[in-house]
Image (cartoon, rainbow, N blue to C red):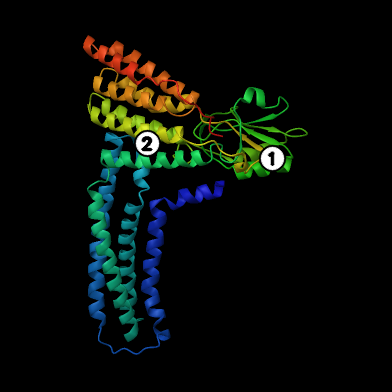
Amino acid sequence: MTRWQWLLGKLTRRLWWRASLFGALGVATAVLSAFVEPYIPWELEAKIGADAVDGILEIIASSMLAVTTFSLSVMTSAYSSATSNVTPRATTLIMEDRLTQTVLSTFIGSFLFAIVGIVVLQTGAYGERGRVILFVATIFVIALIVVSLLRWIDHLTRLGRVGETTNRVEEATHKAIAERVEQPFLGAHPLRDPAREVPKSAGAITANCIGYIQHVDLTALDACAEAADGRIFIAANPGAFVYPDTPLAWLDAKGKLTDEQQNSIRTAFSVGTERNFDQDPRFGLAVMSEIACRALSPAVNDPGTAIDVIGRLTRLLGLWAESPPAPPDEVRFPRLYLPPLASDDLFEDAFMPMARDGAGMIEVQLRLQKALGALGGMGDRAFAAAARKQAQLAIDRAERALDLPADRQRLRAVFRQAAPSPRRTKKTPG
């Protein structure tokens, strides 16, 4: 995905974009009903008066204005609920909910259709057949409103709730991991040890701002490498925090690194104030862990949600563990090199915060040890070692926080039982 495709994807997920499209469609439908009248080949008797259509349009306009205002207040409450009860990082997914955007856009489009229809109708622009066309379009809009209301009522019962929001975070994380499993290095060569693999003659391209890498345009970087007749070694994956003088990449090419080459390569890295789920699987794991930590806080005291999150994280990391090695012919950018996602980082983002906050809860620690034991029997050696490391850290914290000796003994027994036995190992993906 190029930078412009990524920006267009972000744009189309905004509420105002879909609302504008539906609004323009509603206005166009009302206006075209007057202009297409001379081109209708059939004859109709004037059985539909202007007053009949006008009354229906007034009802639609007044009711859609009230329903849209109510729906916006419900959305605001859902955002506030997700921020306080789940995590602020999950609010973005609720704001990008397609069903919510479609329903609200339908209400706004219907409102604009009714307003424009009333205005054009009062001007006398509709003839006999034009009023018939407008009436048919109005019936269609009413049917669309009814369907949207039924979908909206069903959706309101789940919007902003902890379980629904957690599902959205899991889906977004699953999508990011699945895409990374399919292309572990995003079509580039693996860069496993930058200290040894990056030539000393390569010039560093550093960041000129402070923020998180949200997207890397590998197509643009490959074009830059081809223009310079060299190779580009990417220093950081999406989600990394950068600041001035942080290396974004190294260019290994003949001649001195020019300012134009630096600017071209730097532009391929989209840096923003927040992380997103698109190319950053670690962010999704961290947000899932935040949900568990919020549930484990004394103000909420909901260990059941934390246990549920542990199960979801086990599924997500299990997907990554079972990823097959990428065949060499999948390298689409032969001049680019990208570092892999480290298993230690994935496990830290997923389990370390809740192991710390839930250290004194035996039910959470038992489920955590069982999950880490299951993950320790999957993946390659680095993956299993990362699972074992987090299991050891979790039990060390728990033994300091648990007061009852029986709880500590039970947890230690589960730790020994869940410890993965030596088994086959596979190559690291890529």
Q: In this view, does 174 lie above or below 346?
A: below
Which quarter shows the C terminus? Answer: top right
- Across and down, in percent, residue 389 comes to 42, 18
User: Dot 2 corresponds to which residue?
Assistant: 89
**Depth check, front residue: 79 or 333:** 333
Name the side, left or right, on which 324 lies relative to 358. Answer: right
Quarter of the image where one finds residue 43: bottom left
Q: In this view, does 126 lie above or below 323?
A: below
- Across and down, in percent, residue 425 comes to 50, 26
Residue at the image position 34 percent from the left and 82 percent from the top: 130
Name the side, left or right, on which 37 lies relative to 194. Answer: left
Name the side, left or right, on which 196 lies relative to 10. Answer: right
User: Dot 1 corresponds to which residue?
Assistant: 225
Can see residue 208? yes
- Across and down, in percent, residue 299 comes to 22, 26
Q: What element carries label 2?
A: helix
The kind of residue on which mark 1 rests is: Ala
